[in-house]
Image (spheres, rainbow, N blue to C red):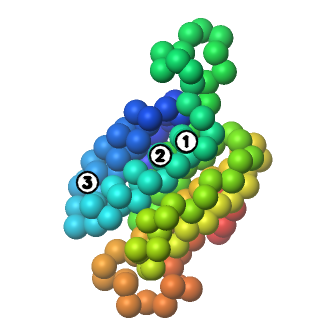
């Protein structure tokens, strides 16, 4: 299962991405991990928006160069993943909150244009599996 959302890279994107995560997790029967996913999603999207910049002023005018981000949420193989694709080559630092979640895997993947910064969270029934068995993101992020 996979869902995505295209957003303008501005602070309101954080709330939109979190809403996507909370609604989909509920539909997928995974509400029990929603607080962790919301925290991680908030940090990642905020970091991307802060790093690549948001349009100035907050109300872009026609013809302004508006950076867009694509948020992708997926669930497969005992994990839930979230990625933010953006058109820049600027590396997004791993959020500092990542140290509080050692079971979460963070990474970046270069795309044809831009990059994807992503994380995967094992669902509680798979927390005892070794981390090497956690499936990687969908193929479009550079993995099988």
Residue tagged 3: 27
Q: Quadrant of residue 139?
A: bottom right
Instruction: Please say whether residue 92 is visible from this viewpoint.
Output: yes
Find the distance from the CA under tag 1 to the CA under tag 3.
30 Å
Q: Give the label on residue 46, or none.
A: 2
Quarter of the figure that contains the C terminus:
bottom right
| Mark with earlier residue (2, 3) | 3
Up-down relation of residue 124 to residue 65 (above or below)? below
Q: Residue at x 66, y 21 (%)?
A: 65
Q: Give the label on residue 115, or none.
A: none
Q: Nearer the viewer, residue 130 or 67?
A: 67
Q: Nearer the viewer, residue 115 or 57?
A: 57
Q: In the visual, does 112 lie left or right of 37? A: right
**Number of marks present in the image shown:** 3
Q: Give the label on residue 50, or none.
A: 1
Quarter of the figure that contains the N terminus:
bottom left
Decide: few, some or many residues near mark 1? Use Cα within 10 Å; few <14, some 14-19, many ≥20.
some
Find the distance from the CA under tag 2 to the CA under tag 3.
25 Å
| Mark with earlier residue (1, 3) | 3
Up-down relation of residue 144 to residue 113 (above or below)? below
Q: Quadrant of residue 68?
A: top right
Decide: few, some or many residues near mark 3? Use Cα within 10 Å; few <14, some 14-19, many ≥20.
few
User: What x and y, as percent, mark residue 14?
Assistant: 41, 42
Q: In the visual, does 62 lie left or right of 75? A: right
Helix, strand or loop under label 1: helix
User: Mark 2 and 1 residues: CB-CB less than 8 Å, in contact?
Assistant: yes
Q: Residue at x 61, y 44 (%)?
A: 51
Helix, strand or loop under label 2: helix
Q: Residue at x 49, y 90 (%)?
A: 130
Up-down relation of residue 47 to residue 101 (above or below)? above
Up-down relation of residue 127 to residue 106 (above or below)? below
User: Mark 2 and 3 residues: CB-CB less than 8 Å, in contact?
Assistant: no
């Amino acid at each position: 299962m996979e869902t995505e959302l295209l957003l303008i890279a501005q602070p309101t994107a954080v709330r939109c991405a979190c809403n996507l995560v909370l609604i989909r997790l509920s539909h997928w029967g995974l509400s029990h991990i929603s607080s962790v996913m919301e925290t991680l999603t908030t940090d990642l999207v905020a970091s991307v928006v802060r790093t690549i910049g948001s349009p100035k002023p907050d109300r872009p005018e026609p013809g302004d160069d508006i950076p867009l981000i694509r948020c992708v949420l997926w669930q497969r193989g005992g994990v839930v993943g979230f990625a933010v694709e953006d058109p820049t080559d600027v590396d997004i630092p791993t959020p500092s909150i990542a140290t509080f979640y050692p079971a979460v895997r963070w990474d970046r993947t270069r795309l044809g244009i831009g990059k994807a910064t992503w994380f995967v969270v094992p669902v509680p029934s798979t927390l005892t599996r070794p981390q090497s068995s956690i499936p990687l993101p969908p193929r479009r992020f550079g993995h099988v």
